[in-house]
Image (tube, helix red, strand yellow):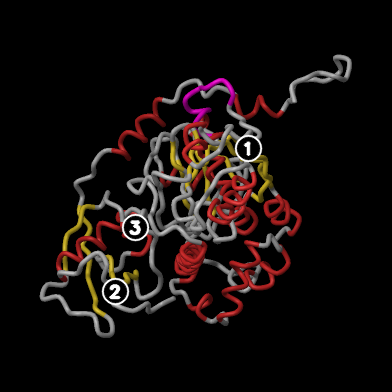
Amino acid sequence: MSTSVSKSVWEGRIPLAFSIDGSEAQHFGAEHTPSSIFIEVPRTSYLILLTEEIRDLYRATGLTLPDSTAEIWFEYQGKPLKWHYPLGLLYDILCISEPSYLQMEDTKSIPWNIKVHFRNYPAAHLFRDQSAATAQDFFMSMIKEADFLRYGSTKRVMNLSKSDQTQLWESLCSNDFDSFWKVNQRLIPVDDQVVRHIPLRLYLPDDCPVIQDRVSPRTEDGEELTMEQIIRELLPTLDTSKSKAVCHGVIVPFDTPIIWASRNLAYPDNFLHIALF
Amino acid sequence: MEADDTGGQRQPPAERNILTEAVTDKKELKDIISAKKEKDATKVIVQFRAIGNAPILKQKLFKITASQKFQAVNLFLRRELNYAPSEALFLYINSAFAPAPDEIISNLYKSFGTEGFLVVNYCTTAAWG
């Protein structure tokens, strides 16, 4: 594993600019519409981890807001943002892959303009049960899915003590690289150990359903496969010469070996999340 | 941010070109996306297995539309068990993990299906964390 690459992935950040509609600010008792609020967050973080801070920041601008964060949600260009997706992944899908696909003029939106809502939660698009505890459950489930894909069981995760499991999530929340990897290194394969499948998800533009399948990292002859070979296997009709794969805001060369990519570019949930366009 | 206060020395950022580079013909990609979005009538055979005190179903195998999300499995099982939405019901795949409600059944089957089934365990108290 290349520590410098996984450290860069961990240290990747996105500047966010939050704004609120005037009518909504008025509804909550503000005399003027507050100006944008700027926060920089790790790409590996989740919106759900920001709701309390956002509530407090908007309270400070004069809004009278309830203590509960259950009604808070976020929107970008009319789309409710999934609070259980890493922020970096949402950005790659919505600000890099989609605009490029639709051939929109400005594909890179920095800071990323996100609209905050404190009411009318879109329960048809987002899970109702939004809380840090649920987000932690989803995160651990992803880690177990990844474990199952790699080794055919969740033994490695289940062998971690309760406090080690908690440490995975809490070190993500506190953006503590060393603390995270102290536990996570026990989940990833050592050196030449062969895993059955690579935990991988592909995201195409335009609200396309997510693609996930059993992905072997090697051919039957033991030859290591590249990102391009894997993508061709999953999407045989895609012309890869006209496509791009984005992860952590960076275009991943198609000849990247999939095993290297999985070890170095996976999100903390142990999945390789690739936006393709 | 856009103001140029460096006496015209500032160049437009070069990295923009890579990301904005027009993908000239995206027909294949468009076709793939519309095919993926089409309502897929393919069915996945789900095998329900009760754990602990959960009531056992008379019939254990059901065909469920593959393009649906996992929450459809939850709703379906609740109907079969006559469970209200407020009653606790936990679903797991392969006695191992609980997928998110928005995961697609066909993806779960392709990734975790065994011997032609997608095994879904269910119980009334949390089993595998």
Give the structural element (helix, strand or loop) at label 2: strand
User: Does residue B13 sit above or below A223 in this rendering?
Assistant: above
The stretch in magenta equals: A97-106
User: Which of A190/A165 is in front?
Assistant: A165
User: Does residue A200 sit above or below B6 in this rendering?
Assistant: below
Horizontally, residue B100 falls left or right of residue B66, namely right
Name the chain under label 1. Answer: A
* Residue occupying the point 44% across, 41% down: A80
Name the outermost residue toward the top.
Answer: B8
Labelled pair 1, 3 in contact (Cβ < 8 Å): no
Q: Distance between the residues labelled 1 and 2?
A: 43 Å
Instruction: Indicate whether residue A104 is drawn in magenta.
Output: yes
Local crowd size for mark 1, using a 10 Å CA cut-off: few (<14), some (14–19), many (≥20): some
Name the outermost residue toward the right.
Answer: B7
Q: Name the residue under label 3.
A: B110
* Residue occupying the point 66% across, 49% down: A41
User: Which circle, 1 or 3, is nearer the viewer?
Assistant: 1
Instruction: Indicate whether residue B85 is drawn in magenta.
Output: no
Q: Is residue A196 visible?
A: no
Q: How far apart are marks 1 and 3 (CA)?
A: 39 Å
Q: Can residue A33 be seen in this view?
A: yes
Local crowd size for mark 3, using a 10 Å CA cut-off: few (<14), some (14–19), many (≥20): some
Residue A229, horizontal then vertical, whole percent: 50, 45
Give the structural element (helix, strand or loop) at label 1: strand
Q: In the rendered view of the protein, which quadrant contains the N terminus of chain B?
A: top right
Q: Mark 2 points at which residue?
A: B121
